[in-house]
Image: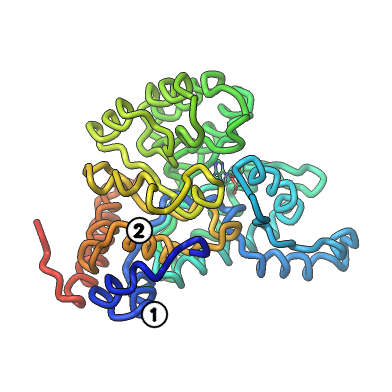
Amino acid sequence: MDKFDKSIYEDFVKENYGSWEEFKQYCVELPKIEFHAHLNGSITPKTMNELIEQRKGKEPDLAGFAVKKLIQPNFQLEDFFPLFNTVYRLTDNTESIEYITRNVLKEFAADGVCYIELRSTPRQNLEKGMKKKNYAETLISVINEINKKNDIIVRLILSIDRKASLEEAMETVNLAIELKSTGIVVGVDMCGNTNGGEFLRIKPAFHYAKKNNLSVTLHVAEIPNCREDNLNMIEVSPNRMGHCTFLEDDLLKWAKDNNVAIETCITSNIICRTVKSYDVHPCIEYMKNDQPFTICTDDKGIFNCDLSDEYLIFGLINKLNKKQLFEVSKRAISYVMDNDIKLKKQLETIYNNFSKKNGFLIEK
Ligand SMILES: CNc1ncnc2c1ncn2[C@@H]1O[C@H](COP(=O)(O)O)[C@@H](O)[C@H]1O
C-alpha cells in the first residue's frame, strides 16, 4: 500500500464502505480463500525473531542473526529468491517447521481466511534429522491440530523447486501420492527461482501427478519471454496457475475456456516489479474479461501483506462495492483442489451466512 495514492479513492471509499477503517474491517470479516501462500515466505519477522530467541542458546551463531528489513529500496524479483538462504537457516529442523506452520495458519485464520491450501517444498537436513517425509508429516500434524479447532480449514500442496532434477521432482510427487490418503495433501506445485531451468526437464513428474489424481498448480509466466515454458506448462493441463503476469493472450484464452483460475498476487508483483503499478495490474483485465482468477498473498511475511489487504487493494483498483467483492471471494470455492462435496457445502454455508448477515441477495 506504500506506493498507493489513496487520495484519489477517498470518495469511492466513503460512498461504498464509509471510511478506510470500515473498508479494512470489511475485508477482514469477509470470508476468504487462500490458494497461493508459500509457507517459508509467509513467516512474519516477529516469528523469525522468536525462532532466533528460542534457538540462540544452543546455536550461538544465531545470536548475531538479525532479521533485517527484507525489502530494500529498488528491490526486484532477482533479489527475492536469495532471501530464502536466510529464512531456511531458521527453518532447518522439524521443531521450527512446526512452530512456523502453527503461527502462519493462526495468522491467516485471524485475518478471516476460512480455507487455505498452504504450499511448501519438502526439504531435508540430515544433520538435524529432517527428511523430506518428516518435513511433510510435521506440516500435516500441525494442520490436523488446526483443523480440529474449526477456525480455518487447511489443505496442503507440496511444492517442487524449478531447479530440481526429474528424479527429485518424482520423489516429491510420490510423497504427495503417499500422503494423499491423509486427506490433507491435495496437489503439487512448481515454484522457485525463475532462472532455475526449463520446465521441460521436470514436466513428466507433473503428468505423473495428474495421472495419480493429484491436482497441479504451476508458476506460469512470472517473467516475460518464456513462451516455450508456458506452452509446456499448459500441456500438463494445470488445475490452477500462479502469477501469469506475462501470459500471452492465446494462453489466457485457454485458461478461460478451461476454467483454470489464475492465482493473482498483486502486492508481490508490485514489490518484485513484474507489474509497474497497481493501476495496470492484469487483475483489472481479468475482472473485465470474466477470466477465472483468485486473489492471493504469495509470501505475506516477506511482502508484509495480509489477504484482507489484497482484497482491499483489489476492491479499490476495480472500484468494487461490498457485494461485488464478496462475489469475487465466493467464486474461489469452484477452484478448490479438494473435491469433497461436504467441504464445498461447508464453504458455501460460510459464504451464505456472511451474505445473509450483510443483506446481499443470493444469486443462483
Ligand atoms: C515471487 N513469487 C514467487 N515465485 C516463485 N517462487 C516463489 C515465489 N514466492 C515464493 N517462492 C518459492 O517458495 C519457496 C519458499 O517456500 P517453501 O520453502 O516452499 O515453504 C522458495 O523456493 C521460493 O523460491
Residue type marked 2:
Phe
- Can the viewer see residue 38? yes
Query: Mark 1 near mark 2, Cβ–Cβ under 8 Å?
Result: no
Quarter residue 330 falls in? bottom left
Q: Position of residue 331 (x, y in %)?
A: 25, 53
Residue 150 against residue 282 in the figure, above or below = below
Pointer 1 residue: 21
For label 2, the SS is helix
Q: Nearer the viewer, residue 150 or 48?
A: 48
Pointer 2 residue: 314
Q: Residue at x 66, y 55 (%)?
A: 73
Quarter residue 255 falls in? top left
Give the image quadrant in which the ligand numbered 1 is located.
top right
Q: Nearer the viewer, residue 352 or 331?
A: 331
Q: Residue at x 32, y 46 (%)?
A: 293
Which badge, 1 or 2, comes first in the chain's sequence? 1
Q: Position of residue 96 (x, y in %)?
A: 69, 59
Q: Quadrant of the C terminus?
A: bottom left
Residue 231 against residue 354 in the figure, above or below = above
Residue type marked 1:
Glu
Q: CA distance from mark 1 to mark 2?
A: 16 Å
Mark 2 surroundings within 10 Å by alpha-carbon count, few (fewer than 14), some (14 through 19), many (20 or more) = many
Q: Residue at x 31, y 62 (%)?
A: 315
